[in-house]
Image (tube, rainbow, N blue to C red):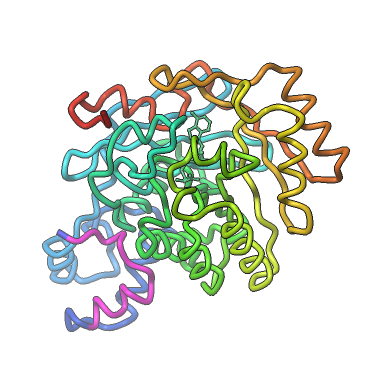
Amino acid sequence: MKSIYDFTQEQLIDEFIALGEKKFRATQVFEWIYRQHVYQFDLMNNISLSLREKLSQTYSIDLLKIKEKQVSKDGTIKYLFELEDGGLIESVLMIHDYGKSLCVTSQLGCNMGCRFCASGLLKKQRNLTAGEMVNQVLSVMNDTQERVSHVVVMGTGEPFDNYDHVMDFIHIINHPKGLAIGARHLTISTCGLCDKIEMYAHVGIQANLAISLHAPNDEIRDQLMPINKAYPMDQLRETIEYYIEKTNRRVTLEYILLRGVNDQIVHARQLAHYIRGLNAYVNLIPYNAVDEHGYQQSLPQDVEAFKNELLRLKINVTQRKEHGRDIDGACGQLRAKKVGESQRWK
Ligand code: SAH
């Protein structure tokens, strides 16, 4: 069955027209869901009983099933949701001073195979639908009874490997008649699929773009991220330049500091050289150790030295705070624990 959450408002209008219904009925349903937070057709009382019945036979509207929920001392909540087909996904709610930010999963598993990442331990089974991503936001808001103000597509999966559904998702939650989460409060993180970054440069609403760089040169990036073989760093830089030129938006370059791998002064210098001239800043990310991979968090003094070297070279730097250290914090760890060994990469 199709999910009612799969559709942008415009698509829902087309659906209703195809069902022989009036346009404004679609808008009513959209508003019931995204403004009134009503997740049952039965309760939409300005809609005729017969249409409500037709809708429940045509679309699923159930929120996601919470299989497990972990609450951290710092307020971070990690959800393990079960999809209709039994697939398990994680969403993580983080509390910031500026609001509540939800980290959303875009694929069931991931095929990018980054060497440090827990998500990549499990192969991609399928893309999530737009509705399944929307449903993560609705289910968390329903559970906490609070508004999610920011969304980051940084959970399991490569969003640009599920491009169309992720674009629909962004449009649905951004829509002014819907959740109205502003484009500046939305962030898509990609490991660097250049062709899709170029496409994305032409999309009407521009959420923030974050690129998982994690290395100062091809030699190191090749080791960490197989995608670098397809889109090496020179090409990636040209693409980022193109994106910035088209959109006039600043780009975030994510950089996980891995002890002894990419965290030395010489690396900071190479990184600064790479970024020079780009309207971009570096977000330094503390590594969340994944037992299977053997990488370690950088030493505090190396993090400081790395950051100071970038600052000295006039590169803008921010440092990501760790959230939910006391729960299965790292991306995909809760899920990886739950899903059988059989699905793991060799
Ligand atoms: N595929 C996308 C989005 C999902 S990963 C991407 O690559 O950007 C979201 C971010 O978390 C990426 O920057 C990723 O490299 C990072 N990440 C993955 N595993 C991590 C870990 N164990 N500790 C810290 N960051 C991690």
Indicate yes or no whether the magenta region holds residue 229: no
- Left or right placement of residue 318 versus residue 326 in this view: right
- Left or right placement of residue 172 versus residue 61 in this view: right
Q: How many marks?
A: 0
From the viewer's perspective, is residue 346 above or below residue 181? above
- Taking the spot 36% from the left edge, 66% from the top edge, the residue there is 30
Residue nearest the viewer, comparing 78 with 4: 78
- Taking the spot 63% from the left edge, 21% from the top edge, the residue there is 260
In terms of image quadrants, where is residue 271? Answer: top right
Q: Which residues are magenta?
A: 2-17
* Dominant SS in magenta: helix
- Left or right placement of residue 329 versus residue 184 in this view: left
- Taking the spot 29% from the left edge, 52% from the top edge, the residue there is 127
| Quarter of the image where the C terminus is located | top left
Task: Tell me residue 37's x, y (percent).
Answer: 39, 53
Task: Tell me residue 57's x, y (percent).
Answer: 11, 62
Task: Tell me residue 247's x, y (percent).
Answer: 65, 70
